Amino acid sequence: MLASRSWLSRPLHERSTRLFLGVLLASLAVVTLLNLALPAGHTLHVSTYTVTLLGKYLCYALLAVAVDLVWGYLGILSLGHGAFFALGGYAMGMYLMRQIGDRGVYGHPVLPDFMVFLDWQSLPWYWHGFDMAWFAFLMVLLAPGLLALVFGFLAFRSRVTGVYLSIITQALTFALMLAFFRNEMGFGGNNGLTDFKELLGVDLTDDATRLGLFLATGVALALGYLLCRAIVASKLGRVCVATRDAEARTRFLGYRVERFQLFVFVVSAMLAGVAGALYVPQVGIINPGEFSPIFSIEIVLWVALGGRGTLYGAVIGALLVNYAKTVFTGVMPDAWLFALGGLFVLVTVLLPRGIAGLLAYRRPRRAAPDPSTTPREASA
Amino acid sequence: MNFLTSLADRDRVFDFLVPVDSPVDVRHGPILYLEDVTVSFDGFRAIDRLNLTIDDGELRCIIGPNGAGKTTMMDIITGKTRPDTGRVWFGSRHDLLTMNEPQIASLGIGRKFQKPTTFEALSVFENLELAMAADKRILPTLTARTSGEIRERIEEVLTTIGLVELRHRPAGILSHGQKQWLEIGMLLMQRPRLLLVDEPVAGMTEQEMERTAELLTGLAGKQSVVVVEHDMGFVRSIARTVTVLHQGSVLAEGSMNQVSMDPRVVEVYLGAEADEEVA
């Protein structure tokens, strides 16, 4: 039945994936239409500010999908995915800094403002090449990918899993945060990288650019979702689920478990990097705060709320929680963390499989239920 | 001089010239051959000069009281434990004592442990698919397609283990007995020549035991099967030849009737049960 299809196009034939993509693309079209076609005073008009806000949510959604890939299907609870997100963001930020050229406050033709301020004479070696878009975009994938490769190689080879791995990933992102806070690192220290002007030659403050970035993020989310779906629907995905539930048994069947873990972990880190790269031009700043351990934990909360091991649940969770965060921090800034905590407790008690679990419960059970909808809790 | 003539012997292939992954040679009958095997743990002789021969396609039951060395024997065959002395051959070509566990497994010796471990979130079909002998590196696994041939093989095993109707249900909902059968099916997917089955009917109901007996007797002939079991009723229902182990060596061997007549066997093992039957 599946014999004639390649692994990449396989998810396009799934009903749930088609539904997800349909809803996503339709939403993108509706937002675009409401933004462009209606006058600014109209009640249904979507302002450019809102479009950018939605674009930010979509970045978070892609990040959540990346986390769900390793947590939901491989059973690896990464509490450091913010690091990969931030690295992708910094790669993009470095490109945007070089795009400023001599329009900075100090007007130096090559050096970014903060380097002039620190009285640096020349560009550090690792800033070279970032004036070229192709190089910077390659780094968006390679920087998080390489970190994940080295980190994952060491961790999985030593068979570090479960709680210990989670703790090490927290340490990883915390260490990077401290490093990036230092001015000597050459990444803008505390202030990070900001004051961006142009992306690929177009003005970042332009309404059209903002809408374009929003749409690009939507497309990236769709493609990232498709890639993850293709992976989990392949035999490799079933090996992942097998590893999650009975690692020793999988090894006994002849699968080199640590290599599968490493492969999926690197793919996930790269997706997180892409999300970070799309995030930076939309919010206009990247600073070490993105490396903070709290942020990485928050990502896991989105996935848990939305429903782990479904991919679309991660998207729902990221969108809902971040929308709630925007509303709450506007109305009662101090209450937000309590609301988040309370929400998490409620969902854990009432909806152990998250919002996606609720959706799956309402739908009539198919003859062959998706194995991914019943992740075991043991590995968490 | 004898040595030199043996070197000139044209019929003979030197052992070191035979590749490790060459097929099992069973032209001489036995598929498994243990000779004078002894293992001691801290001075305690778990296996004491054990001699055992399993013929190709045979179904053999091994019984014996606790501590008789049944599990240790399995460990030696699969390469988990190294004997102090003795010889262990698989067919007449492969010296198992020179191989490690994965090599022995890839030769075609499959072992089913007492406690079944299946992938509960995956369907019965997918469990079998993962167990199948295939290229298990990352990219071939990612791009793997479930071809008609693979499907047929899985269906064949599903029929053998009697789980055809449950093929798309997650393994987690299976009963204990069904999980044991699935586990045996996962072994069969690797096309083993020799199956080592450790206590297959522990915790099973009567019907499940009957079904397991049918399954194992059906496998014999195609594969060689060695069953270690405590349940005497079950052994009686499947065994053609029974080997009784006691204190690490063979106490008696023969049909179930012969063995249960043997006064030494009755004394060390069947005694309690024989008394019960009389009563």
Image (spheres, coloured by chain):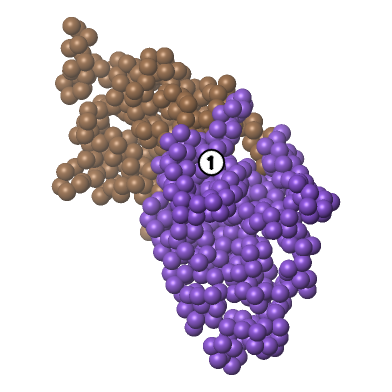
* Residue A119 occupies quadrant: bottom right
Q: Residue at x 71, y 53 (%)?
A: A218
Give x and y (percent) for residue B142.
62, 49
Query: Is label 1 in a helix, a strand or a loop?
Result: loop
Give the colour of chain A: purple
Give x and y (percent) for residue A265.
54, 56
Give the colour of chain B: brown
Neighbor class of circle 1 (other Cα within 10 Å; few <14, some 14-19, many 20+) is: many
Q: Is residue A303 above or below residue A132?
A: above
Horizontal placement of B209 versus A291: left or right? left
Horizontal placement of A33 versus B76: left or right? right
Horizontal placement of B145 versus A346: left or right? right
Read off the residue under disc 1: A307
* Residue A124 occupies quadrant: bottom right
Residue at far front of view? A41
Question: The numbered mark 1 sits on a residue in which chain?
Answer: A
Q: Residue at x 65, y 75 (%)?
A: A195
Q: Residue at x 16, y 21 (%)?
A: B267
Q: Nearer the viewer, residue B94 or A236?
A: A236
Residue B259 seen in this snapshot? yes
Q: Nearer the viewer, residue A235 or A274?
A: A274
Q: Nearer the viewer, residue A44 or A178?
A: A44
**Residue type marked 1:** Gly
